[in-house]
Amino acid sequence: MTFGRKMAVFAAAFIVTAVSGFSQTTEEKQAWYIIFPANSADLQKITGDTAIRNAQSFTKVAQALLENPQYRILVDGHANPVMKTASEETGSLRPLSVRRAEAAADFLVKYYGVDRERLILTGAGGGYPFGTKDPSLDRRVSFFVITPR
């Protein structure tokens, strides 16, 4: 997906503010992220509190789709840059971010019965970091609800 197309999709996307009681507090926004281990798109390697939070996020996304059949979800994969070079971005970060989006979509389809046609997958690479000192937050998949026009 080109950058212009991706920005058009983002312009049409929004974080849910009224669906299923969701609000736009910081806590709720964080509930829309799935965190991955370093250098991996494997959800099975996640344990502890992160695994519980990931499961809650998947449940909320699936619930939003089930309760609103007109919605689609943008599944946007991310990776955290280490060297911050162009070759790292194209050679490893973008492919990893796409694999993360695919893993999250596969999980929603397999375990929640979500229709794959309602998921739009993108890979942002390392281009949109959270800007915190915790690199695990940049190893994520973000979910955005897209409403029909």
Image (spheres, rainbow, N blue to C red):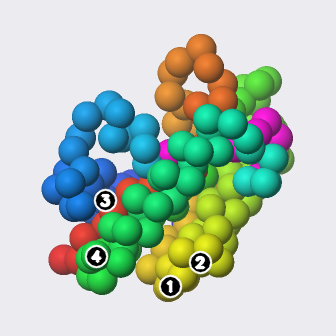
Task: Name the residue beneath numbered marker 3.
Answer: 13
* Amino acid type, mark 2: Val
Residue 138 placement (x, y as % from top left): 61, 34
Residue 70 placement (x, y as % from top left): 27, 82
Between 90 and 41, the one nearer to me in the picture? 41
Examine the structure image and report whether residue 110 is included in the region drawn in magenta. Answer: no
Element assignment for label 3 = strand
* Amino acid type, mark 3: Ala
* Amino acid type, mark 1: Asp
Main SS of the magenta part reads loop
Task: Name the residue beneath numbered marker 2.
Answer: 109
Where, quadrant-wise, is the C terminus in this rendering?
bottom left
Task: Name the residue beneath numbered marker 4.
Answer: 67
The first of marks 4 and 1 along the sequence is: 4
The first of marks 1 and 2 along the sequence is: 2
Q: Is residue 103 above or below residue 90?
A: below
